[in-house]
Amino acid sequence: MYSMYRCRCYLLGAAVFCGFKIYTHYQQIDEQTEAFAEIAEVVENAEPEEEPPKDKDTPVSEGEDILAKYKELYLQNEDMVGWIAIDGTGINYPVMQSRNSPNFYLKHSFEKEYSDLGVPYIQEDCDILTSDNLVILRTPHQRRQDVRGVGRLQIQELL
């Protein structure tokens, strides 16, 4: 009798723990979705700047050659290297790259806070400025409904 009671307690404890983990996971999805919507809104509402003509022989300082609509986000997080949007889906995210911490954005948000969901990122050893090679873009734990009915891929470069 005592072992039956103990077994039920263990099962109840496991069910409560699993329910808590599921609840926090979906809560984090909602928070991350809202954060991505706010980030996308910054890009959509950015004022277009008139670009001065660039002399190809004059080097540009780091951060000065950022497209105007991404500048505010780049100033918030300099690991941002681009933007990915796929028409007809919910995919509309910043693309990050952390050269010093491999896979950093696998478990971190745009704000560099811990997140089980992560942010799309480029593998740390890919050089997007000088390489004509394949760039590996990783999209950790993206929501399934984001990729249903994937349309034409549109990658907007930051630089």
Image (tube, grey):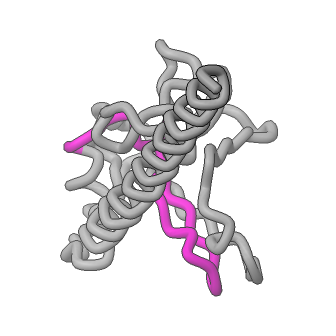
Which residue of the protein is positioned furthest toward the bottom in this rendering? 88
Q: Quadrant of the N terminus?
A: top right
Left or right: where 72 falls relative to 92: left
Q: Position of residue 134 (x, y in %)?
A: 80, 40
The residue sitting at 43% across, 54% down in the picture is 23
Q: Is residue 117 visible?
A: no
Which residue is nearer to you in this view: 47 or 152?
152
Which residue is nearer to you in this view: 114 or 132?
114
Q: Position of residue 59 (x, y in %)?
A: 36, 33
Look at the image and give the residue range highlighted in magenta: 75-96
The residue sitting at 70% across, 33% down in the picture is 131
Q: Position of residue 98 (x, y in %)?
A: 48, 25
Q: Position of residue 32 (x, y in %)?
A: 38, 56
Q: Is residue 77 visible?
A: yes
Above or below: residue 140 compared with residue 70: above
The residue sitting at 64% across, 48% down in the picture is 139
Q: Quadrant of residue 29?
A: bottom left
Above or below: residue 99 compared with residue 126: above
Which residue is nearer to you in this view: 81 or 3?
3
